Amino acid sequence: MFSECVDDYENYSSLRQGVDVNFASLVGPRISAERKRLKLSQAAVAEACGVSREMWGKYERGKAAMGIEVLSSFVAAGADALFVLTGETAALAPEASPDEQLVLEAYRELSPAKRKQLLVDLLSGSALAHSPREGGVAVSGDKNRVAGRDNVVQASPRKRK
C-alpha cells in the first residue's frame, strides 16, 4: 500500500493531509489571479469564454477543470496561459531592456479596450502627434521656470575648525 501511494505522489500527499489535490485545485487560484489581473468580473470573463458564471466560479475554486476551448477563450481575453497552467511567467522578450520590460508589464495590466486603443494610436502614429520631433526635448512647467536654470541648490556654509 505504501509503495502505491509513493508512486502516485499527488494522491500520497493529499491522503496524508486529508486534502484532495488535483489539476483543477492547483489551477483554480491561478485562474482567479489572472481574471483579477485583467480586471474582469467573473460574469464578464465567463461570458467571454462561453460558460456560465457559476461554472467559472467552479474553475476558480478548483472544483472543475476548464477544457481547451475555455482556456483558449481566456487566453484570447488576455490571460497568460503559461501562468494558468504552470504558475510561472516567462518574459516574452528576455533580451529586452528594463524600459522595454516596464512598457510590456504596463501593457499587460491594461484592459482589452485600452490595449486596442494603444495599439491603434501607436500604429497610426497619432501617439506621436503631440510629442517633440525626433531628437528634440519637450519641457513644460509653470511660474516661468526654465528647466536646468531655476533649480538652484544652495550649499550649507562650512564650519571652520
Image (tube, rainbow, N blue to C red):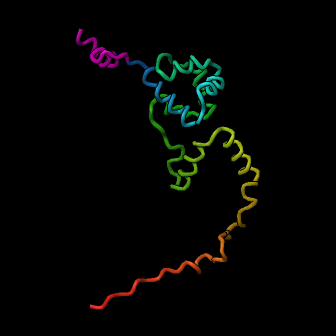
The magenta region covers 1-20
Can you say which quadrant of the picture contains the C terminus? bottom left
The residue most toward the front is: 143
Q: Position of residue 22 (x, y in %)?
A: 41, 18
Q: To which quarter of the image does residue 69 belong?
A: top right
Q: Is residue 29 above or below residue 135?
A: above
Q: Is residue 58 above or below residue 34?
A: above
The residue most toward the left is: 2
Which residue: 63% across, 31% down?
A: 76
Number of marks drawn = 0
Q: Nearer the viewer, residue 133 or 160?
A: 160
Q: Position of residue 7 (x, y in %)?
A: 29, 16
155 with respect to 43 (left or right): left
> Main structural element of the magenta stretch: helix, strand or loop?
helix
Q: Position of residue 74 (x, y in %)?
A: 60, 28
Q: Is residue 131 above or below residue 30?
A: below
Which residue: 51% across, 51% down?
A: 95
Q: Position of residue 6 (x, y in %)?
A: 27, 16
